[in-house]
Amino acid sequence: MQLLDGKYISEKLKKQIAVEAGEVLAATGRKPHLVAILVGNDGGSETYVASKIKNCENVGFKSSLFRYNDSVTEADLLLKIEEINRDEEVDGLIVQLPLPKHINPEKVTETIDHRKDVDGFHPINLGRMMRNLPCFIPATPYGILLMLQEYQIETAGKHCVVVGRSNIVGMPISVLMARNANPGNCTVTLTHSKTIDLKKQVLQADIIIAAIGKKKFITADMVKPGAIVFDVGINREESTETKSGYKLFGDVDFENVAPKTSWITPVPGGVGLMTIVGLLKNTLASAKKEIYK
Ligand code: GUN
């Protein structure tokens, strides 16, 4: 078993991003600029957004955070998004999910200018992704592709089983792994809550991508010897063992699964760190007008 080391890879890629951010500043007089909108006080979202902002500063990007409390109206939020869309000094805009129930996430996503949609959630970016056209790829799937690339893991012809069909991870990564691209060219099975005999499906996998949001859901009896395992789960539980007051668990029972695998991502220290890199790379690509002119 070998670890897919998110810490090592993310630090390496962030150094390259910082160099390119410096080149953008020298050429344009402007740093790449990411705007984040955070609604409410969800503990997980607070942590993720704080980490995105901090990482922007570390690689030489400008970042701005607009905070709203839970009671903000959908109309006010959409107005703010439209204002940021028009701001030529902004390269990327993300609205952290989940949103309060009275706000329609589809409306929010579609209001963001697709040329600034560095989360890659807008239907135009998702459609372009399916057609293998230049687009912003959702950050977590992008992070997984970058890990496969960095470790030079061959994916062509392999059977990839994705567990979970979320808009953010499961659905897009299943498309990306099936695309005629490298990484890609997998035979993909997308499993979900209605899948019959999930264990039988997962046991077929050369590559398992676990994105179901349930602690230790993938157990050793579900894993073929030699499989490659990506654990996307970030399940937070309160804990007295850590300084932060909570502990993270993946979707994979790491202790028992890891010895059976050829490669596996830890939690924390795996895919989560790569998600930030995906977001930074999309923001940089936007600043350099690499995707949309
Ligand atoms: N919530 C969980 N993951 C994400 C993400 O990648 N982007 C945004 N905007 N919200 C999220």
Image (cartoon, rainbow, N blue to C red):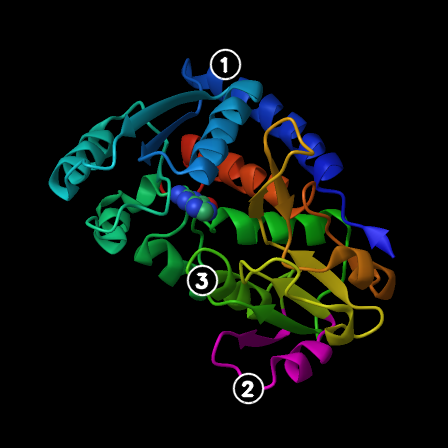
Q: Which residue is mark 2?
A: 196
Dot 1 amino acid type? Ala
Bin the neighbour count of mark 3 within 10 Å (Cα to Cα): few under 14, some 14-19, many 20 and up: some
Which marked residue is nearer to the observer: mark 3 or mark 1?
A: 3
Q: Earlier in the sequence, mark 3 or mark 2?
A: 3
The residue where tag 1 is placed is: 26
Asked if disc 3 and disc 2 are in contact, CB closer than 8 Å, the reply is no
| Residue 9 vertical position relative to residue 163 in the rendered view, above or below | above
Number of marks in picture: 3
Choose top left, top right, bottom left or bottom right for residue 292.
Answer: top left
Answer with the quarter of the image where residue 15 lies: top right
- Residue in view at x 51 percent, y 19 percent: 57
Q: Earlier in the sequence, mark 3 or mark 1?
A: 1
Which residue is under mark 3? 166
State the residue lying farthest toward the left: 75
Q: Position of residue 213 (x, y in %)?
A: 53, 58
Q: Tag 1's secondary structure?
A: helix
Quadrant of the image where one finds ligand 1: top left
Q: Which residues are magenta?
A: 185-206
- The residue at the point 54 percent across, 74 percent down is 190
